[in-house]
Every structure is written in structure tokens, then in C-alpha cells.
Amino acid sequence: MAYARARAAIRLAGVVWALSGPAGAMAEGPIAGGTGMAGPVAAGPVTAAPAAWSFKLGGLQLTALRDGGFVTPNDGGDFGSKAGPAAVAALLAGSGAATDRISLDVSALIVRMPGHLVLLDTGLGPADHGALRQSLALAGVSPGEVTDVLITHAHGDHVGGLLGEDGRSAFPRATIRLSVREWAWMRAQAETRALAAVISPRVRAFEPGKPILPGITPIALYGHTPGHVGYEIVSRGERLEDIGDTAHSTVVNLARPDWTGGMDLDPPAGAATRRRALEHLAATRELVFAPHFPFPGVGRIEAKGGGFTWKPAPDTRR
């Protein structure tokens, strides 16, 4: 489970996450299926240029923010642990991707609404060279303007940016919202206890299923972590769902949603949640934001055979 081990080593402003095994060092390289790294593939974050991609959802303006990337080797751990590396490699080859690794993006999402400037997840954080702060600047947002931070789950590539380089809150005015289950799990884990203690005064935990802000409702998507959620955003009849880590790879997870692997803490539950969520999204045709899909991670899910495929949203920016 190389991704899980390396993700556990992500540093939070000087707080080193607990590590259950050796993790790959930060590497310069492509963030979506490239072949720029020679030799054995080491799991770990990769840097990416900051970027902001704005679009409309009903009466709301949303902006996808690029933070970085993550690479995990195709070794039968994180993806297709029962199917095996050869089966995963066949899928990757069919999409024109490198067959020895799975390359993922790390992105966040901003929602502007009356009275609130909402950030969904916070990326890797400054200690692992996350570009979220620079991407926010490209979107015309300063950290002090953020009023709400919505967390899908408490893995380091989603909560790493909650702290600045000084170890203090990166978003000093923001209320931090995550599910009751995830908050309990976050406080119980040795590797996240220190972070939880810093942010605790700003945390408001919720039960999924009811709106927490106007037009934003958390959805239980348990399995990846005990309290993992997505967020349904609705405005003027238009919908977008932030699926968090329900699916990581547009190639492997969509073509074979039932394959299990070390990406999920509870692999059978993660696969069942993934299948159910993808079927729903393909049926409703609503927009999707997937933080690990190729930037900007905005598009739609379509059914294809026994699996699904990804249709990126067209770039309508002017």
C-alpha cells in the first residue's frame, strides 16, 4: 500500500506524520500519466504549477485549484490488489498512460456564495510544496477571506493545507467542517492528533444528509475512511458533487470500480460505495468534481460496459 504509506508521511508545517514504512521522496514529474521519472517508482507527492479554473454552477462561481500531484507504483498494492499489476497495466496501456505507475492530481475547490467563501479540502500543505496558496492568489482569493473549509476526509493530501508554514491555521477566519465520524477518527489517530489539536477550536462536526451551508449538503461516502463524505452543491437547479476520494483514477477506478486496493481503509466498503456513487452520477448526469482526476477534475461520469468513463467538462472560460 505504497500510496497509504507515503501519504502518512506527508508533513504538516513541521509535524511529521507517522510512517509505517519507507516513503518516496518528493519528485519533480508529470501529474497525470507521464513517463518523466526513470528507475523504480517511489510513491509520493510531486510538484505542479499553480492553476485556477473557474466556471459557473447556476448562480454560483466555482474555481478548481491545482495543488500538486501524487504518484503510486503499479505493484498490486493500491490499485487492483486482487486483479494484479498485469491487469492494471493493461488498463493503463489502453489509455496511453505509463504502465508502472498511477499518477494522480491533487486539487481543491472554491465556492463563492453570498456571505460565504467556501474551500473544499486543502491539499498537501506547504511542507510538501503544495501550490494551493498560489492557486488561491490566481483566483483572487486571500486565505483570510475564506469563511468555511469543508473536509472530505482527514488524509494528508486533503488536510495538509490547514496549517501554514508557521504551524498556525492557514485560514484564520474559517470554520472547519467535517463529519462526526471523521472528526472522531482524526482525533484518535496518532498521525493526525497534533493537527486536530490545533484546529479544534474552529471545528464544527456534522452528520451527513442535511445542508450545512445554503445549497451545500454532505453525503456519506464511507469506506475510504470511516467518515469520508462528498458534498452536493446545488444552485438554480444545477448540481455538482465533490466526490472526494470515492474514485482516484479515471482509468482504473472507473473501468473497474469493483476492484479493491490499499487506497481504501475498508476496501470492500470503499468498492461498494464507489459502485453505488458512480451509478448515481451516471444516471443523474450532474457535474462532478474529483480532486484526484486530471486537473481541473470537473466533468461527468458516463456508464460504459460494466464500468464507467470520464468526460471532462469543456473549457468555456473567456
Image (cartoon, helix red, strand yellow):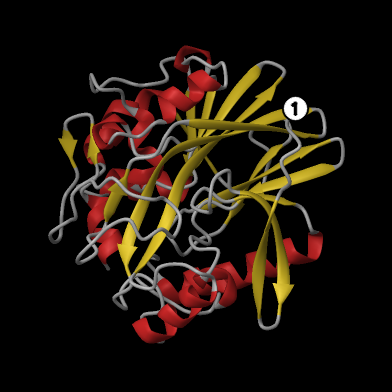
Badge 1: residue crowd in 10 Å (few <14, some 14–19, many ≥20): few
Depicted 214 relative to depicted 207: above or below: above
Give whichever of 22, 74 is nearer the camera: 74
Q: Residue at x 48, y 37 (%)?
A: 66
Amino acid type shown at disc 1: Arg
Query: Is residue 84 among the parts visible in the rendering?
Result: no
Give the answer, above or below, for where 186 lies relative to 62. below
Q: Quadrant of the C terminus?
A: top right
Answer above or below: position of 45 versus 200: below
Q: Position of residue 180 (x, y in %)?
A: 47, 45
Residue identified by numbered label 1? 318
Secondary structure under tag 1 reads: loop
Q: Is residue 103 left or right of residue 95?
A: left
Residue 276, position in %: x, y? 64, 70
The residue positioned 41% from the left and 58% from the top of the image is 34
Rendering coords of residue 188 (x, y %): 27, 48
Q: Quadrant of the N terminus?
A: bottom left
In the picture, measured across the screen, residue 79 lies left or right of residue 245, that is left
